[in-house]
Image: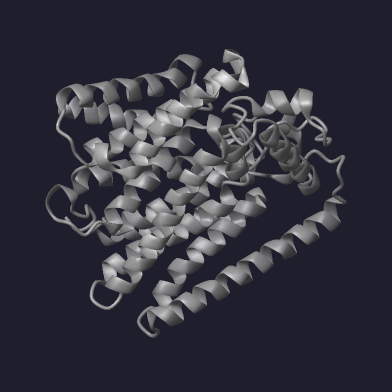
C-alpha cells in the first residue's frame, strides 16, 4: 500500500511540472492524486509527528482557513475565488504530505530526482525551440514574437514562467548532487545546471537572471574561497556579491529601457508594473489591511484600478500579491517564516563551517535558493495559479527543515542518513 502511495506522489509531482500541455483531464489528475495521497496518509498514519508540529505546515493551513474567512468581508465571487483557492489548498496538502511521508533519504532523493527529470525535459525542449524556432506549445499570440527572438519557453505559458521554474530548480539539483554518489551523475547535474542558466539568460527574464546569478554565485564562493576565509569574511563577500548582482540587474534594466523606450503605455513596462503595485496597495487600504481575497486581484484591477495598467491585470509580484490578497497578518507570518529560514541557515554556517563541510555546503546552497527566490518570484504574472510552483514551494519548506535540524531519530537530517 505504501509503495502505491509513493508511486502516486511521484507521478503527481512529474505531472505538475508539465501541466500546461497535458489534456484537461490529466491536468486535474495530478491534483486528484495529491488529494488521494493526502487522505491516505491521514488514514494510515495517525501518529503525531513533524507534519503536525512544523510551523510551515501550520501556517499553510492557517492561510487556507483565513482565505475562506475572507469571503465574509470581500464578497468575492466564487468563480474568481475557487481557481486560486484550489491551488492554495493543494499547496497546504502538498506541504503536509511532504513532511508526513518524507522520512528517509531515499524518498527525499526520489522527489528531487522527479525535479531533475522535469528540468532535463524542459532543457531539451527549450534548446529545441532556440535552435529550430519551432514552438510546439506556445499560444499563437506569443508565437511570432518568440520565433523572431528565439526565446525558449518549453511547455510554459511564457518565458517568465519557464525561467522561474529553471532558476528555482537549479538549487534543488545542487542539493541532489550532495546525495548522488556516482561521479557521472554529479557531472550530468553540473551540465544540466549550466544549460539551465544559459536558457534563463536566453529567455531574457531579468529578475530570474539576477536570481540565478546571485544564487549560483554563492555556491561558487564555496567552491573557490570557503577553505581560505573565515565565516565573517565569507558574509562580507556574500554582501559584496549581492551588491554586484543588483548593480548588474540595474545595468540590464537601463539598457533594456533604452532599447525598448519603456513608458507607461507599454504593457510590459516596469512603469506599468509599478502602477499594478500601486493599485494593489490602494485595494489593500480599502480592505483595511485584511486583504481583498486570493482570486480577486484581476477583477479589481479591471474594474476598480485608479492607475492605468493598459490591459495588464495580474500584479506580477508574489510578495505584493500575498499582501494584497491575504492582508497584513498572513503576509507578516509568511515573511517571518522566510526570514526565519534565512537566519537559521546562516546560524548553521557558523556552527558547522569548521567541522562539517557537507552541512556548510547544504546551507550555502539553500541560502542561494532563498536569495534567488526573492527575485524570481517577482517575474511571473501570478504564482498562485501555477501548480508546479506549489510543488517547489512545499519542497523549500521541507529542505529547510532537513538541512537545519540537529536532532536524532525521526527528526534526523535526511541528508546525513
Left or right of residue 219, residue 202 in this image: right
Q: Which of these two is toward me, 98 or 343?
A: 343
Q: Is residue 221 above or below residue 228?
A: above
Provide residue 249's location: percent of width, then percent of height.
Answer: 68, 62
Provide residue 346's location: percent of width, then percent of height.
Answer: 39, 66
Q: Which of these two is toward me, 216 or 181?
A: 216
At horizontal 74% and vertical 29% (from top left) the residue drawn is 301
Left or right of residue 214, residue 344 in this image: left
Q: Residue furthest front?
A: 288
Looking at the image, can residue 378 be seen? yes
At horizontal 78% and vertical 56% (from top left) the residue drawn is 256
Provide residue 384's location: percent of width, then percent of height.
Answer: 54, 33
At horizontal 80% and vertical 47% (from top left) the residue drawn is 271
Q: Is residue 315 above or below residue 79?
A: below
Looking at the image, can residue 127 be seen? no
Left or right of residue 175, residue 125 in this image: right
Amino acid at each position: 500500500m505504501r509503495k502505491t502511495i509513493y508511486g502516486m506522489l511521484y507521478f503527481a509531482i512529474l505531472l505538475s511540472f508539465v501541466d500546461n500541455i497535458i489534456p484537461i483531464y490529466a491536468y486535474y489528475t495530478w491534483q486528484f492524486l495529491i488529494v488521494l495521497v493526502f487522505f491516505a496518509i491521514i488514514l494510515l498514519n495517525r501518529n503525531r509527528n513533524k507534519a503536525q508540529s512544523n510551523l510551515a505546515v501550520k501556517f499553510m493551513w492557517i492561510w487556507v482557513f483565513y482565505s475562506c474567512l475572507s469571503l465574509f468581508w470581500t464578497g468575492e465571487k466564487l468563480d474568481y475565488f475557487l481557481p486560486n483557492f484550489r491551488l492554495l489548498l493543494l499547496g497546504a496538502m502538498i506541504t503536509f504530505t511532504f513532511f508526513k511521508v518524507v522520512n528517509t533519504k531515499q524518498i527525499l532523493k526520489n522527489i528531487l530526482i522527479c525535479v531533475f527529470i522535469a528540468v532535463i525535459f524542459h532543457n531539451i525542449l527549450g534548446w529545441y525551440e532556440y535552435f529550430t524556432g519551432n514552438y510546439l506549445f506556445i499560444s499563437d499570440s506569443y508565437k511570432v514574437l518568440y520565433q523572431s527572438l528565439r526565446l525558449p519557453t518549453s511547455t510554459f505559458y511564457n518565458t517568465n514562467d519557464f525561467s522561474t521554474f529553471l532558476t528555482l530548480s537549479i538549487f534543488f539539483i545542487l542539493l541532489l548532487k550532495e546525495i548522488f554518489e556516482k561521479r557521472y551523475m554529479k557531472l550530468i547535474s553540473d551540465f544540466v545546471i549550466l544549460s539551465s542558466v544559459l536558457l534563463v539568460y536566453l529567455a531574457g527574464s531579468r529578475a530570474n537572471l539576477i536570481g540565478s546569478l546571485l544564487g549560483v554565485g554563492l555556491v561558487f564562493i564555496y567552491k573557490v574561497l570557503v577553505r581560505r576565509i573565515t565565516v565573517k569574511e565569507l558574509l562580507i563577500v556574500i554582501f559584496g556579491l549581492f551588491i554586484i548582482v543588483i548593480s548588474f540587474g540595474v545595468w540590464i534594466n537601463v539598457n533594456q529601457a533604452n532599447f525598448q523606450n519603456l513608458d507607461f503605455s507599454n504593457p510590459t513596462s516596469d512603469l506599468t508594473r509599478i502602477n499594478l503595485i500601486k493599485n494593489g496597495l490602494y485595494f489593500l487600504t480599502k480592505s483595511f489591511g485584511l486583504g481583498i481575497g486570493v482570486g480577486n486581484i484581476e477583477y479589481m484591477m479591471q474594474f476598480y484600478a485608479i492607475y492605468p495598467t493598459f490591459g495588464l491585470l495580474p500584479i506580477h509580484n508574489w510578495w505584493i500579491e500575498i499582501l494584497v490578497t491575504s492582508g497584513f497578518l498572513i503576509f507578516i507570518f509568511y515573511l517571518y517564516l522566510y526570514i526565519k529560514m534565512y537566519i537559521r541557515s546562516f546560524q548553521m554556517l557558523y556552527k558547522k563551517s569548521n567541522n562539517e563541510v557537507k552541512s556548510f555546503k547544504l546551507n550555502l546552497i539553500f541560502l542561494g535558493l532563498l536569495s534567488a527566490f526573492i527575485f524570481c518570484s517577482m517575474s511571473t504574472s501570478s504564482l498562485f495559479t501555477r501548480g508546479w510552483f506549489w510543488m517547489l514551494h512545499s519542497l523549500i519548506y521541507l529542505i529547510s527543515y532537513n538541512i537545519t535540524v540537529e536532532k536524532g531519530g525521526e527528526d534526523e537530517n535526511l541528508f546525513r542518513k
